[in-house]
Image: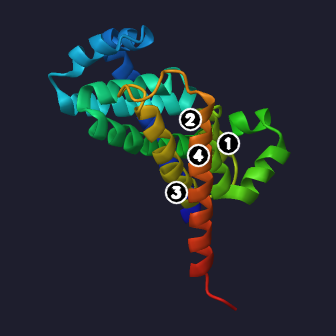
Amino acid sequence: MKKKSRVTHKKWLVWSGLFLLLIFLVLNRQIILLLVNQDVVAIRDFLDNNLIYAYLFLLIIMTIQNSFTVFPLLLVISINISLFGFVSGFLWSWISSVIAAAIVFYGVRYLFQEMLIEKFRPELLEKIDANGFAYVFQGRIFPLVPTSMVNILAGLSTVRFWPFFLGTTFGNFIYFFFLSLIPAGLLSDQLNETVIWIILISGILIYYLIKLVRKKRKPSN
């Protein structure tokens, strides 16, 4: 009974969040149009006078990006860096992406699971169930995997929240750092093969380091 009550409460929170999101988008039609046109300079000028509002707005845009990939991830990161500078822009892009991923994860699991689960093969979800953290982490650092797809599949599976959260946190830190170098002018806007390999190798090394630490922490029988 308590479990059912918790699920109902989470569904109510998700529906409330979606309703508020709709109102927010309607009230901000002008800047949404600038986002569609990918006009970073105009967006920066629009948000520059109210940084608290800018943080909130960009968190919501990151949540949309993690849900449907409507706006390119590089565009959102570029706006953050243009507004807040390289360090703060990178950090807010990373932190907001983790928050957004958690929102989408819970939304799929407690609200849209029945609607979406039939669209994916059971074998794929079973593979994700068995690999939890590894699936999420690898999905985050691989440049060709949409962030929304990682969130949706994790929400449909039985992966627990904390492996999802940690895989997202570590994976996005690596991937977002390299993406942040592009608007900072340190990399070309075309992710060339060398950069992709750097991201993948860095991610693999960190993954095995985390796996080694976790293995050492497990009590021996």
Circles 1 and 2 in contact, beta carbons < 8 Å: no
Instruction: Compare marks 4 and 2 and give the one earlier in the sequence.
Output: 4
Q: Residues within 10 Å of mark 1 (few under 14, many from 20)?
A: many
The three-letter code of the residue at mark 2 reads: Val
- Residue 105 against residue 17 in the figure, above or below: below
Circles 4 and 2 in contact, beta carbons < 8 Å: no
Q: Quadrant of the C terminus?
A: bottom right
Instruction: Identify the residue position indicated by label 4 in the image.
Output: 110
| Label at residue 166 | 3
Instruction: Identify the residue position indicated by label 2 in the image.
Output: 195
Residue at 65% from the left image edge and 31% from the top image edge: 144
Q: CA distance from mark 3 to mark 4?
A: 20 Å
Can you tell which of label 4 and label 2 is closer to the viewer?
A: 2
Q: CA distance from mark 4 to mark 2?
A: 37 Å
Instruction: Compare marks 1 and 2 and give the one earlier in the sequence.
Output: 1
Q: Residues within 10 Å of mark 4 (few under 14, many from 20)?
A: some
Circles 3 and 4 in contact, beta carbons < 8 Å: no
Residue at 67% from the left image edge and 50% from the top image edge: 135
Residue at 50% from the left image edge and 22% from the top image edge: 72
